[in-house]
Image (cartoon, grey):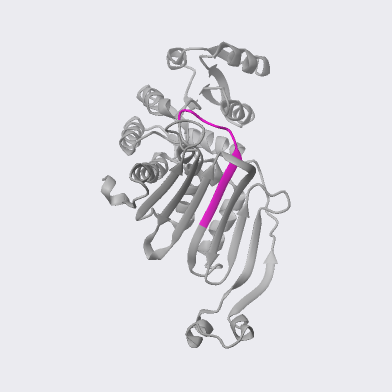
Amino acid sequence: MGIGTAVIGVGYWGPNLVRNLASTPDCDLRMLCDRDESRRANIGRQYPGVDLTASVDDVLKNSAIDAVVVATPADTHYELALRILESGRSVFVEKPLARTSRECERLIEEADGQNVQLMVGHTFEFNAAVEYVEDLIEARELGQVYYIYSQRLNLGVVRQDVNALWNLAPHDISIAMRWLKREPLRVAARGYTYLQAGVEDVVYLDLEFEGGVAVHIHVSWLDPGKVRRMTVVGSRKMVVYDDASTEGKIQLFDKGIDREQLDDSLGEFDSFGKFQLTQRAGDVLIPKIDFSEPLKRECNHFVQSVVEGRRPLTDGRNGLRVVRVLEAATRSLQGDGIAIELDSLD
């Protein structure tokens, strides 16, 4: 028998987790929990051998449950995760891990004290294309990273419990910090509300990292097209990661500006031809990447982390780092876009 697993929340995202967990080696899917009767009935028809309940208490009373997956609204994450950890079980929590850094720290403390695993659902960190770009940066293939900009846009799904910042930006924040191997120094954000009072539909987020590396993130659930694109501009090469592309998720551009020639000219050119000499335009590479579903990899990683007793890649500390940025961005939104130093959160 594998790890006895329960899933709390089978609304919008939960069924995707259930589908992947049901086929994950070493995972014994035992119980599905949701307060909505119609959701329970629907998921029960798909998984007739799994117990159904409306009560979290039933999950925690079940001695066959070793690990719990939480896919409920964001404002319930902390309370549920803490109860699960206090019961001595490992827990996977969909992003965001919690609503404040202090809540994240409490969850980390409890997980460490209970010697169980705490993991957050930063799914794109299990994306092979994200790993490919990380390898490019680490190998200095791009040269010095100048800046990153990201767009995560779609028409819907409109949320009421969180704004577009908390719903969409965790992905881009977690990817950027993974690529750059550090947290930003300061954060600034501006948001705009059109559909619901007090819930930003569109957010523009700027992160400033040590060394002058800038990251610009644009998120919206009020846009005509589905866009999932990140661009990294380096001193040697540039790369575009387009998760929505069906032709190639990575494009590596061997192009840039020759700094030495630019410096020699002092930025002044007596002809367009001489300016072109400072440009370098080489090939565009679309690498073949062995792709498997990131969510499947994420679910398998969680289960194996529980089986082996090892800390997950996207552990509580990973979740804390993202929530710190979201907290700073929220303060900036409330302060009309003023930059917030991350150190000021301590």
Q: Is residue 61 left or right of residue 344?
A: right
Residue 153 part of the magenta segment: yes
Rendered location of residue 20, percent (x, y): 62, 31
Which residue is pictured at 46% across the width and 28% down the height? 161
> How many circles with numbers are drawn on the protein?
0
Instruction: Compare residues 187 and 294 and report the one nearer the observer.
Output: 187
Say above or below: 95 vs 136. Answer: above
Rendered location of residue 180, percent (x, y): 45, 58
Which residue is pictured at 52% across the width and 71% down the height? 235
Residue 213 part of the magenta segment: no
Instruction: Compare residues 25 and 199 and report the one nearer the observer.
Output: 199
Give the magenta range.
Answer: 149-161
Residue extending farthest right: 247
Instruction: Compare residues 139 and 39 and report the one nearer the observer.
Output: 39
Q: Is residue 124 left or right of residue 340?
A: right
The picture quadrant where one finds residue 48 is: top right
Which residue is pictured at 42% across the width and 33% down the height? 198
Rendered location of residue 260, percent (x, y): 50, 83
